[in-house]
Amino acid sequence: MDAWLELARGPLFAATFLVMVLGLVRQLGMQAVQLVRRRHLLRRARWRVILGDAFSWSLPLGHLVRGTVVLTVVSILFHLGVVLVPLLLADHIAMWERLLGVTLPKLSVGVADLLTIVAIACALLLLAYRTLVPRARALSRPRDYLALVLVVMPMVSGYLAAHPAWNPLPWQMMMLVHLLSAELLFVVIPFSKLSHMVLFPLERLSQTYWQVQPGAGERVAQALLGEEARV
Amino acid sequence: MAIPESALSQGSPKVKPESWYSFHVDEAPAGDRVERFLAAFAAILHYGGYRGLLDTYVAALGRCSRCTVSCPIYQVTGDPRDIPCYRTHLLLDVYKRHFSLSGWVRSRFGHGRELTEELVDELAETVWRCNACRRCSLECPLGIDHALLVHLGRYILSMARIAPKALQVSVREQLEGKTRNTSKLPRAALISNLEFLEEELEELLGLPVRFPVDQPGRDMVFFCAVSDYLMEADTLMGNAAVLFAAGDAERWTIGSGNFDAINYGLFYNDWHLERIIGRLMEEVLRLDGRSILIGECGHASRSAKEYVPVFGGDGAYPVQSITEYTYRCLQAGRITLDGRVITERVTYHDPCNMARSGWIVDQPRAVLKSFVKNFVEMEPHGRANYCCGGGGGLVSLDETHEYRMEVAGRLKAEQLRQTRANICVAPCANCKKQLKELVEHYQIPCRVVGLHDLILQALVIPGATDPRQRREYMATQLE
Ligand code: HEM
Ligand code: SF4
């Protein structure tokens, strides 16, 4: 067991973390290539509006429109836990120091516990929403449920590992589950919609795609309808 | 999910509730539609520069369901096929399955959604029932612009020769016909219409306000939706009156070679879009004009504003909408509006193509509030307005009347009723047509007019009739 734990803690962690970082860098790189290709269009982009929108969605309190109020609040609480706890939990800070050599401010144990519990509850609510509300169910695909489950697993196992009174398994076993599920998540993130954690400000720029390339339409028409293409 | 038998396969124009959404294609498409769809998609991907967009969307789509609250159509139908994100998925599925490596690999294992006849039908149905109002982009946390994919979907379909007949016929006349405009208005008819309008204006104002035609070297060349020349006399007279009052009577002209700003290409086809913009620029060049002035029309303003720079390059002609122009004149003190004339309760409808990007929201309100005492807003309004229900070219498809009334325009009608306004101002030819049909259909006691219709009544011009007399005269004319 200890050997497994060592593996999950050391090489496996480093490897999967690297996969995530590289994967996300690749996603960002692809976006950068798109931006460079369209740089002549970016000049005419409505930057104030685009940046304003992206900013307003970072903490979407301005988007409590009728019909999404509950969803928004739940989503914000969920994200609070999902973003803060992995970064700032005391035990994680030690890990970041060991791994990356950076020292982050630390959450008090009580706050971290609360955030985790709230995030787990919110994730379950999101799952229920997807399963029970027709409009969400119509859109959902297996991978959407899976994403939520994958995100919840490290949170649940981490919480249990930190609270022996609740933990049905030996600590080492639970820790192993925690590590492996987190590592699975690392691998999945860059190849799924979870990559929104880095991509989300960039999608706004898709507005610039309205500005099509000069001459493209003509070439499409000729390719499909011949030289004498007519409407 | 089965879709209702579409007019596509059944070819009959009978409107059943289930076929509300259906549209009427130009010519009975011969040959394999799946194949043609894929060929068109391939060509557009190859030349069109949409690949980056699709890859981005494939990576990002969250399926969070928020767009359901923003789409006025889904709110009425509750049909999952009307969820913006659902529709986007249909197209992205085809893209992934047929045009990406991973899709190809997955298909080897029996995964992924193969394009079938039924899927082509469903795509056609879903993209043509959307108003392309872009309201869903506001409530998408990722800023996904579902209407852009509707545009792409329609582009592909129309290049596969699956497009509504009414639009195709109009564009064909505009680009390849004799009259070069969507209403088939001959040059001679234009000239006599303008003469008639000049007489009217003289009667109304007591001043010789002209519609200059083919004057070379003018600052502004004016284009409006050509239907205005047939249906919106007051709007046009208001436009000319403002230009006159601001001292610009000698600085603008209409070109008789091309006077139609309608650009259905914006709704469904990049090829048409570019050619129509090219036509505008040609006319300005022919007249040695210096800038483009677009009349009261949302999609015409947006297509010119956004695409003249795209297709015209760096030295492209500046574009402004008449709404902006009038606003600037008012700001600069070049025109005055009489606050005593309009006593009714007035509301303002934002044309999506002007308001959604935040481009023209405050300007018309500043103009209206400067002379309308009793102004009331619809809720929601501005960037978050509801589409009139005729967006995306639907208003030009008579077959969609029932759909536009019962589904697409339903929330708008409700909004309008709640304002209890007597007058609804909408500076857009398409919106006005749809709104007029709506107030009739729902029997809402409200008159739909253009912005410059009201301005024409309230404009103070030295030497002209008093606005209050003018109003009486117009009231008798109306009866
Ligand atoms: C770092 C900044 C992040 C931002 C700005 C962000 C933003 C968003 C947004 C805008 C949504 C859209 C839907 C909604 O609000 O319901 C969303 C959904 C979601 N996010 Fe994040 N996110 C971030 C980080 C993360 C992280 C680190 C995770 C977990 C690894 C995560 C997991 C999820 C999941 C699972 C959903 C889908 C919820 C559903 O089922 O609807 N997010 N996020
Ligand atoms: S563009 Fe408008 S009509 Fe179309 S899906 Fe979005 S909100 Fe609905």
Image (tube, rainbow, N blue to C red):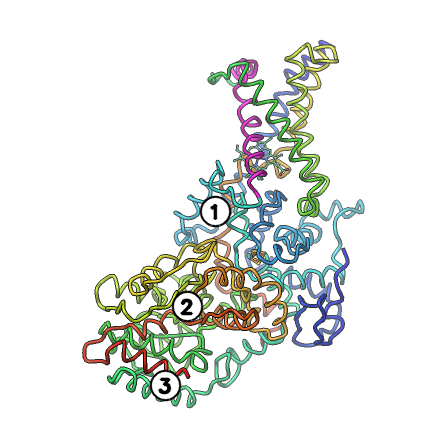
Mark 3 vs mark 2: give the one in front: 2
**Is residue B328 visible to us here?**
yes
The chain containing the residue under callout 2 comes to B
Secondary structure character of the magenta stretch overall: helix
Chain assignment, label 1: A
Q: Earlier in the sequence, mark 3 or mark 2?
A: 3
Q: What amino acid does circle 3 point to?
A: Leu
Of the residues shown, which amino acid type is indicated by label 2?
Pro
Three-letter amino acid code at the position of disc 1: Leu
Circles 2 and 1 on the same subunit: no
Distance Cα–Cα, label 2 vs label 1: 35 Å
Quadrant placement of the C terminus of chain B? bottom left
Q: Is residue A87 magenta?
A: yes
Label 2 neighbour load within 10 Å: few <14, some 14-19, many 20+: many
Q: Range of the magenta residues?
A: A68-97
Q: Residue at x 47, y 18 (%)?
A: A104
Q: Would residue B437 appear left or right of B208 to someone viewing this image?
A: right
SS at mark 3 in the image: helix
How far apart are the alpha carbons under marks 3 and 2? Answer: 20 Å
Quarter of the picture containing the N terminus of chain B is bottom right
Percent of width and height locating residue A229: 59, 75
Name the quadrant where ligand 2 sits. Answer: bottom right
Question: To which residue does mark 3 refer?
Answer: B194
Pick whichever, B471 or B366, lies toward us.
B471
Q: Nearer the viewer, residue A21 or B188?
A: B188
- Report the disc number at residue B301: none
In the picture of the structure, the residue carrying the numbered disc 2 is B427
Q: On residue A35, which mark appears?
A: 1
In front of the other: label 2 or label 1? 2
